[in-house]
Amino acid sequence: IPDAQTRNANSVIANQFFALWELQGLRAPDRATADQALALGALPGATPALRREAAWVAGANAIWRGDSTLLRAQLGTLASDTSAMGRRMVRSLRALQLGRSGQRGAAAESLLVIEREHGESLGAQFQTMLAADRLLGAEWLAEAGRFAPADSLLRFTRSYTTSTNEIFA
């Protein structure tokens, strides 16, 4: 039986996968994804990075479900974060919101700029936001016929290996 820290780490990884599946349309958006992210971010010992990621996941989930109240709360949480990463996450959520409202070309350009400015420098701490931004940005750029920039978003110079056992243990 895994200890509490291992269970929490596994829950974070599973939550990240659920969020990405929802954003890609592979799973119906569920309020439980946002609630779990926020609960994990509120655990004692949660790092500032985990709290920011929790707010981003909850905000992205709110966009996909059309929950403007939760989205405003998460944008407020991230806007009050004085870190550069908090600002990037606000930009990311705003771009996702723009794309979800039908302005996919403008959203894709915004996501492309975030990637060009920060991309690989952000590291594994923010892999959910980066993966979502890249996948959705590439999809929306391809829809606009901009295949080269779309392709560039799908090139990853780092990879993260996670086994099914690690996710659902």
Image: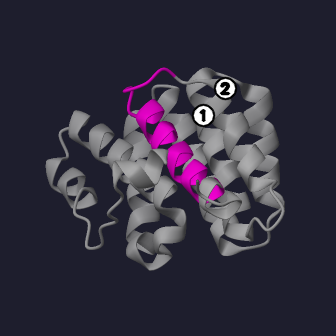
Q: Name the residue under label 2.
A: 31
Q: What residue type is labelled 2?
A: Arg
- Give the mark toward the camera: 2 or 1: 2
Mark 1, residue position? 61
Q: Nearer the viewer, residue 17 or 121?
A: 17
Question: In the displayed structure, would residue 50 be above or below residue 93?
Answer: below
Kindly indicate the quadrant of the structure image that contains residue 61.
top right
Q: How crowded is mark 1: few (under 14 residues within 10 Å), some or many (20 or more)?
A: many
Q: What element does badge 1 sit on?
A: helix
Q: On screen, 79 above or below 118?
A: above
Tell me: 1 left or right of 45: left
Residue 98 is inside the magenta segment: no
Q: Which colour scheme is used?
A: one colour
Could you tell me if the residues under marks 2 and 1 are in contact, i.e. CB atoms within 8 Å? yes
Residue 117: give x, y in percent of width and height. 44, 73
Q: Quadrant location of residue 90?
A: bottom right
Q: Residue furthest bottom?
A: 121
Using a 10 Å C-alpha cutoff, classify the residue at mark 2 as few (fewer than 14 neighbours), some (14 to 19) or many (20 or more).
some
Report helix, strand or loop for mark 2: helix
Residue located 62% across and 34% down the image: 33
Where is 85 relative to 137, above or below? below
Which amino acid, by three-letter code, is at mark 1?
Asn
User: Which of 134 and 27 lies nearest the eye of the viewer?
Assistant: 27
The x, y position of residue 159, in whole percent, is 30, 67
Q: Give the range drawn in magenta.
A: 8-28
Mark 2 or mark 1: name the one nearer the start of the chain.
2
On the rendered structure, is 164 left or right of 37?
A: left
